[in-house]
Amino acid sequence: MHLFYPLTATVQEGSPWKTLPELVDYAKKNPGKLRVITTGVGSTDHFNVESFQSVTGAQFTHVPFKGGESVVAALLGGHGGSHFDTLSKVLPHVEAGKLRILVISKKRAEFPIFQP
């Protein structure tokens, strides 16, 4: 059996970044100033952040949490600029207008604008 969880790059709805290229451009021009929160060192989302930096040349400051919903709460509270995690964690907050998805890793009919 194979499971796939769509991954997202998400920011607060009020953030200045409307697209992933804008976020990457900011992180390149301001190395280390953008805080990216994850569920912890060695987690899947930490791996995704490190891979993303390697591929794009962007430089983030990694802020690890101890996991779970504390990461989403931290993003909602403004303790990080971005978050790389599963769609299921952020979707209720996107639908409530509190978070914005910049990209999603798997094509989904309900999110045509965020395709890679």
Image (cartoon, rainbow, N blue to C red):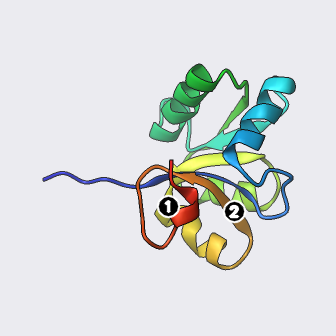
Find residue 65 and report its image quarter: top right
Along the line of sight, the residue nearer the viewer: 15 or 75: 15
What residue did someone put label 1 on?
A: 87
Amino acid beneath label 2: Arg
Mark 1 crowdedness (10 Å alpha carbons): few <14, some 14-19, many ≥20: some
Is residue 109 shown above or below 32? below
Is residue 26 shown above or below 37? above
Residue shown at 58% from the left, 33% from the top: 49
| Residue 96, image x, y percentages | 68, 79
Mark 2 crowdedness (10 Å alpha carbons): few <14, some 14-19, many ≥20: many
Q: In terms of sequence position, does the residue under pointer 2 or pointer 1 come before the other?
A: 1
| Residue 5, image x, y percentages | 37, 55
On the rendered structure, is 76 left or right of 71? right
Find residue 3 and report its image quarter: bottom left
How many discs appear? 2
Is residue 96 shown above or below 72? below
Q: Which mark is residue 37?
A: none
Mark 2 element type: strand
| Residue 33, image x, y percentages | 85, 31
Amino acid beneath label 1: Leu
Find residue 59 and report its image quarter: top right
Is residue 108 shown above or below 34? below
Residue with the most extreme bottom position: 96
Q: Which mark is residue 100?
A: 2
Residue shown at 73% from the left, 29% from the top: 60
Mark 1 element type: helix
Along the line of sight, the residue nearer the viewer: 40 or 54: 54
* Real-space Cα separation, disc 2 to disc 1, in angstroms: 11 Å
On the rendered structure, is 76 left or right of 30? left
On the rendered structure, is 19 left or right of 50? right
